[in-house]
Image (cartoon, grey):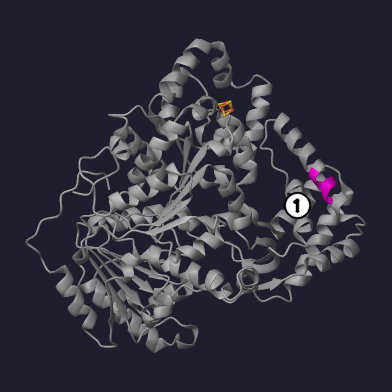
Amino acid sequence: MPKLPRKVAQYFPYSTVRPFQDEFTTTIYDAVREGNHVLLEGSNGLGKTVAALSACLPAAKEKHLQILYAAKTHRQHDRVIEELRAISKTQAVSGLSLRGRAEMCFHPFIVRQAADARSAMEICELLRTAERCPYYQKMSGDVDRCAELQVHISSSAYTSSEIRELCRVEGFCPYEVTKLVVGDVDVTALSYLYVFDPAIRSAFLQRLEKPFKQIILIVDEAHNLPGIAIEIASDRLSQFVIRQAEQEARKYNFPDIAAFSRQLNSLLEQLAARVEEEAHLLPELFLDAIRRRADVDAPLTFFEHLHSVGHVIKRSLLQHGKSPRSHIHRVGEFLSTWLETADDASFTHILSRYVTRTGATSARLEVVALDPSKVTAPVFSAVYCSVGMSGTLEPLESYVKIAGLPDATIQKIVDSPFPREHILSLTCCGVTTAMKQRTRSMYRKLVERIAEVVHHTPANVGVFTVSYEILENLLAAELEGTLEKPLLYERRDMPSRENDRLTRQFKSYAQRGGAVLLGVQGGRSSEGADYPGDNMNAAVVVGVPYAKPTPRTSAQVRYYDSCFPGHGREYGYVLPALTKASQAAGRPIRTLEDRGAIVFLDYRFATRYCQRFLPLWIRRSMKTLPDMNGIVTKELRLFFRPSEEGPPASVQAS
Ligand code: SF4
């Protein structure tokens, strides 16, 4: 039986430790005790959440530190609370999961009108000042009961939904109650944005009432972080918003802003007419064009004018009980960012053309951040220490550089707890989605290989392509007619609710002979969604999802090359693609009892170059198959043949 350090064992709530879970936990414990940053790759099924919590809690308790557990989804936040609850059976630990004001609020005005977090904040502020929020007022009217509730919440582990229900009974504001207790609990599970978005972070730190130096930061699914950091620092402005700003200016009688918006829109149209899909814009030239075209002598002063007019409009809308949205404000904000980043080599400025949901062609301006470390490094250098973990982080030294972690960060790859016979990993030669080989006969061959996998897999199969274009071409190559199981597929711009329905429908086939889910790598179905057991027995990864060679991709590669000579292509092009592919590949392997087949349909996955970027648990048993019909069939038949051996017992939550 694997052993844990004595202090960790006090917090570890289960009677058995999974294979390699001790190594994972001990690495974190040793690092955190010394205040070191640590980065670990460990596959699904390892029990990473409970391992990280029980490894960090001893140091947190001894040194009076608080743990922030950053993860992407509410489901992951709730998992943290479930594990804390298990720990709390023998140890005094507390925690909560945090959600934004818009999701916690009971007030009908916010529920109906708040389009985003900022509107929710502004409406809330106004309601509180005007003494028009009964939930807020009740808190000051019943101070004793409110204090009792705070003590109750801060001494145990509660999800945000549970806190909301407790507050509903009392008639208190759940958001404000959470704010009052968040600094008093041992662990807070929260979205990455609370930690990495500078604006959200500064408000959050005020609530926490402690400096970052007293924080142990756990970043779960850390492979997401560079992309999220880039999103945080980037901004975009569509033609639609510019047109709305013009109308708004007319309505509120600001002829100078109406004229400016009209000229900006016409400049955008003129430039977009010369662009096929996307083009790099020299920021200074664009500002010069604005100056001349819209007769703006001092852009900075004019953009500030847009800001302040927008701000006044927002306040007025609020006072009239309307949602505080101003397109003029948005235009001012974006153009100020454009101006601020004009001379900064860690940003690129893009003009792109796209087709809207209604089928119309439109254009947008984008300020694209190229350096995630500008967002993440200040956080890593401010906290006491951090623990980054994911099933797909290799090569770890590249991640350390991209995320701006200190060079001394401890790096560890932990082996997979899955018995080797539970994972089959195959790469098929003779097939590819490489641009020059996308022929009709190649699509037919891909369809034949997919059909082989579907036929010989007991229940559900996920098929994840590199793009919607490939997905649509597989459909055109009669994929649906070739399969003997029902085919469900994602569509471009599918609303998230519809996508959730699709996933539920797919899972409902698990005990009814199985179905095939066709989606894209990096999409909602191939990242974040869990398919334990027969919900997905096999994942087919069709192609290496390299980004299109667009101006932004080239700018990213050039930027990384300037920071890390010789590594630009690797960091900006290859690594993001292989991380996406690995995420899709890992969908069928979620719990220790799962048996999952991963079939890569692209010979490039068999190259040593690509394999360097695949996690150990995939590449350690990868077989390369020659270009022959029936060979996938043979492998799958062997792998899925009925076994007399029962599933391994486990007492841990998976
Ligand atoms: S105080 Fe709370 S309940 Fe009232 S508006 Fe603000 S968030 Fe909503």
Q: Residue at x 71, y 60 (%)?
A: 239
Q: What residue type is labelled 1?
A: Val
x and y percent of residue 603 in the render? 37, 82
x and y percent of residue 647 in the render? 14, 55
From the viewer's side, name the closer residue of 64 and 90.
64
Magenta segment: does it hold 304? yes
Q: Residue at x 39, y 66 (%)?
A: 582
Q: In which quarter of the image is ligand 1?
A: top right
Tally of marks: 1
Tell me where the magenta segment starts and ends, as one range. 303-307
x and y percent of residue 262 in the render? 82, 58
The local secondary structure at tag 1 comes to: helix
Magenta segment: does it hold 120? no
From the viewer's side, name the closer residue of 573 and 38.
38
Q: Is residue 313 visible?
A: yes
620 over 53 or under it: above or below: below
Q: Can residue 160 be seen in this view?
A: no
* Residue behind mark 1: 331
- CA neighbours of label 1 inside 10 A, class few (<14), some (14 to 19), many (20+): many
x and y percent of residue 487 in the render? 32, 67
539 over 5 or under it: above or below: below
**Farthest residue in the left direction?**
644
From the viewer's side, name the closer residue of 104 and 566.
566
Q: Which residue is drawn at 51% across and 24% down?
A: 177
